[in-house]
Amino acid sequence: MKKKFSKTDLKDFKKIVLKKKEQLLEDLEHISDDTLRKSQKEASGDISGYTYHMADVASDNYDREFSLSLASSDRKALYELDDALKRIEEGTFGVCDECKSFISKARLKAVPSARLCIKCQQKKEKK
């Protein structure tokens, strides 16, 4: 059974991974600009001297927490994409960590950081 992709395939996957990584970095920068670099007043659009209503403060806090959660997920995805790039360089990209069989091109195009084939991923999700 074939265990590795051709150099051309790996080059194509590297482009896919780098493009996804670029998109995530742009998303992170946007989240950072909107959430972390603005004060609570600026984020809410209220630059007047009036006090906040409790519900507005709670809503703003929820939005900020949600944005930080998205940023955390994006950072995890970046780590996984970096790991995929490392596996491309090592020549282990596209091999399932569990059963060591070949991961389909369609799966890797959809989820380039995938470390498991469909069957092993399904088994993992059932647990």
Image: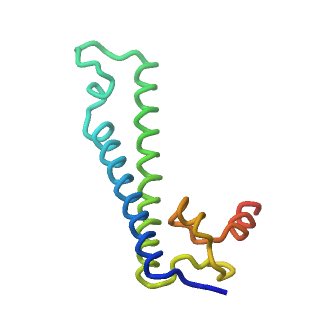
Q: Nearer the viewer, residue 27 or 104?
A: 104
Q: Is residue 91 left or right of residue 126?
A: left
Tell me how the rendering is colored: rainbow
Q: Is residue 24 left or right of residue 29?
A: right
Image x and y of residue 126, in percent: 76, 61
Q: As drawn, which residue projects farthest toward the front?
A: 8
Question: Would you identify the image quadrant in which residue 105 lies?
Answer: bottom right
Q: Nearer the viewer, residue 112 or 83?
A: 112
Q: Residue at x 62, y 85 (%)?
A: 2
Image x and y of residue 101, in percent: 66, 81
Image x and y of residue 57, in percent: 40, 24
Q: Quadrant of the N terminus?
A: bottom right
Q: Is residue 45 left or right of residue 85?
A: left
Q: Residue at x 23, y 19 (%)?
A: 47
Total numbered labels: 0
Q: Quadrant of the C terminus?
A: bottom right
Q: Is residue 46 above or below residue 104?
A: above
Q: Residue at x 40, y 15 (%)?
A: 53
Q: Residue at x 46, y 71 (%)?
A: 84
Question: Would you identify the image quadrant in which residue 50 lies?
Answer: top left
